[in-house]
Image (cartoon, rainbow, N blue to C red):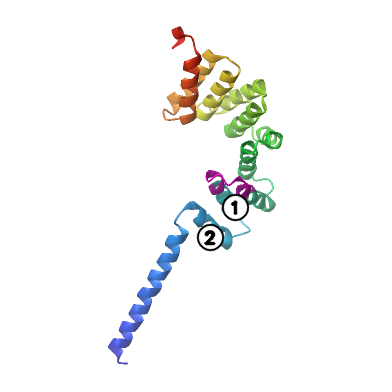
Amino acid sequence: MNAIMLRGSILFLLIFALIFATNIRTHVWMNEYTLWSDVVKKSPNKVMPHLELGNAFVRRGALQYAEREFKLALDINPRDTRVINGLAVIYIKQKKHDDAIRLLEILASDKPNEAVFHSNLGVAYMEKGFLDEAIKVFNAAIKVSPDFPDAYANLGLAYKKKGMLKDAKKELEKALLLSPEHRDAKKTLSEVMGLLPGNYH
């Protein structure tokens, strides 16, 4: 084989190797599940990959697998508030309200300036049927973060469940001022408007 042919063969092999490597990375980056699954395999002792893979599972409705990833993350760092909150959200979705409340009460107490913990605790209370407690913590979330639309939307839903329709309307409209495309606030406000007497429309 002469030098020109040898150089051509080496160049071909290099190009082939680059194409192969690119295809592997493209598969890994295909979606967040494949991306974070790959990161977990490479860094199994870090919290973030398990957290992000757990979040990917939550978004796909695969709660059992999400719970597993969050628990693996807690084995690495039992005090990571992001993971504890994520696990609590899973418990809410699984209707394990007592477990969710237990975790979120600790978070809301330890991190009183984190509005999302108060708001999620309110959701757990509301799902459990503790509407007065839910309203109290939604208001706490709003006090901590007055521009947090989820807290207003959740407060509006709690008022709706209590039959306090004018209060519900007011809070839901605040949520939509902050986030005009807030799907839950839109849906609940539409339901509230259908229940209100005509002169309040």
Q: CA distance from mark 1 to mark 2?
A: 11 Å
Residue 44 location (% of width, % of height): 61, 59
Q: Which residues are magenta?
A: 56-67
Q: Is residue 45 magenta?
A: no
**Residue beneath label 1, please?**
50
Is 159 positioned to the left or the right of 100 in the image? left
Q: Residues within 10 Å of mark 2 (few under 14, many from 20)?
A: some
Q: Which is nearer the N-term, disc 1 or disc 2?
A: 2
Magenta residues: mostly which secondary structure? helix
Mark 1 secondary-structure assignment: helix
Tell which of 99 and 148 is nearer to you.
Answer: 99
Tell which of 144 and 26 is nearer to you.
Answer: 26
Answer whether residue 5 is visible to the viewer in this image: yes
Residue at the top extreme, as displayed: 199
The label on residue 38 is 2
Dot 1 amino acid type: His
Task: Give the vertical position of 75 relative to 192 (above or below).
Answer: below
Dot 2 amino acid type: Asp
Tell which of 119 and 187 is nearer to you.
Answer: 187
> Which quadrant of the figure contains the N terminus?
bottom left
> Which quadrant of the figure contains the C terminus?
top left
Q: Is residue 61 magenta?
A: yes
Residue 50 location (% of width, % of height): 59, 52
Answer whether residue 148 is visible to the viewer in this image: no
Q: Residues within 10 Å of mark 1 (few under 14, many from 20)?
A: many
